[in-house]
Amino acid sequence: MYIFYQYFHKYFAHVLPHLANVRRLSLALPHYRIIAPQFLWILPPTARLTHLTVTGLLDWDGLLRFTVSCPTLEFVVIQIEQTGQTALTNSRLPNLRSLETNAVNLILFEDMNSLENLSTSRIWSASTVEHVVRNFPALLTLWLDGAEQHAAITLIHQYPNLDYLALGFNSVPETLDTM
């Protein structure tokens, strides 16, 4: 396993420094192996990322330091649960327009006034709904996958100006009266 992991890290270290004009970067290892955030720092300074997708990171704070150095980021996808103490805010990512992550990671994003598109999964709790409403006030697109029905309905009522809504529920209520 370690040899397999080490191989991909050597590959990233060889390829990333040559991506002088890259705008969209997606880093993934099979089976959600961990990607160390220091690999992002070896991108050349001319790389102005607008889109970043990662499927696994060892260090949220390392990702935070990198994203703050990329004010051009408009679209971020984080597909594995992260832990961190510091939240990303609109002042750190002023151009962020789209975020795709699971509900657990939403608490790592605060005061995202410029965010227009949110795609998330597994919204179950009232506290998560409150966090979304409080920290993502300008949403125009909302994609909820695996949402609990009450959470989804509460969110939809908070965003009457949605241009696009996609819903995927964990379960279907037996009757509409339970909603």
Image: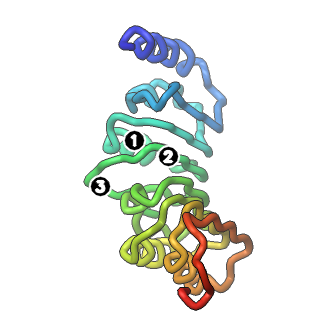
> On the rendered structure, is 158 left or right of 56?
right
> What's the residue type where badge 3 is placed?
Thr
Residue 139 % position (x, y): 60, 72
Residue 89 % position (x, y): 41, 62
Residue 137, compared with residue 39, is above or below; it is below
Residue at x-position 65% and y-position 37%? 23
Residue at x-position 68% and y-position 77%? 162
**Numbered circles on residues, count:** 3
Q: Mark 3 or mark 2, which has the lower sequence index?
A: 2
The quadrant in which residue 61 appears is top left
Residue closest to the far front: 174
Residue at x-position 55% and y-position 49%? 76
What whole-number distance in Å separates the C-alpha atoms at marks 3 and 2?
Answer: 16 Å
> What's the residue type where badge 1 is placed?
Leu
Residue at x-position 52% and y-position 31%? 45
Image quarter hosting the N terminus: top left
Badges 3 and 2: C-beta atoms under 8 Å apart? no
Residue 145 % position (x, y): 59, 61
Residue on which disc 2 sits = 78
Residue closest to the far right: 163
- Mark 1: which secondary structure? helix
Q: Residues within 10 Å of mark 1 (few under 14, many from 20)?
A: some
Residue on which disc 3 sits = 86
Residue on which disc 1 sits = 63
- Mark 3: which secondary structure? loop
Q: Mark 1 or mark 3, which has the lower sequence index?
A: 1
Residue 128 % position (x, y): 41, 70
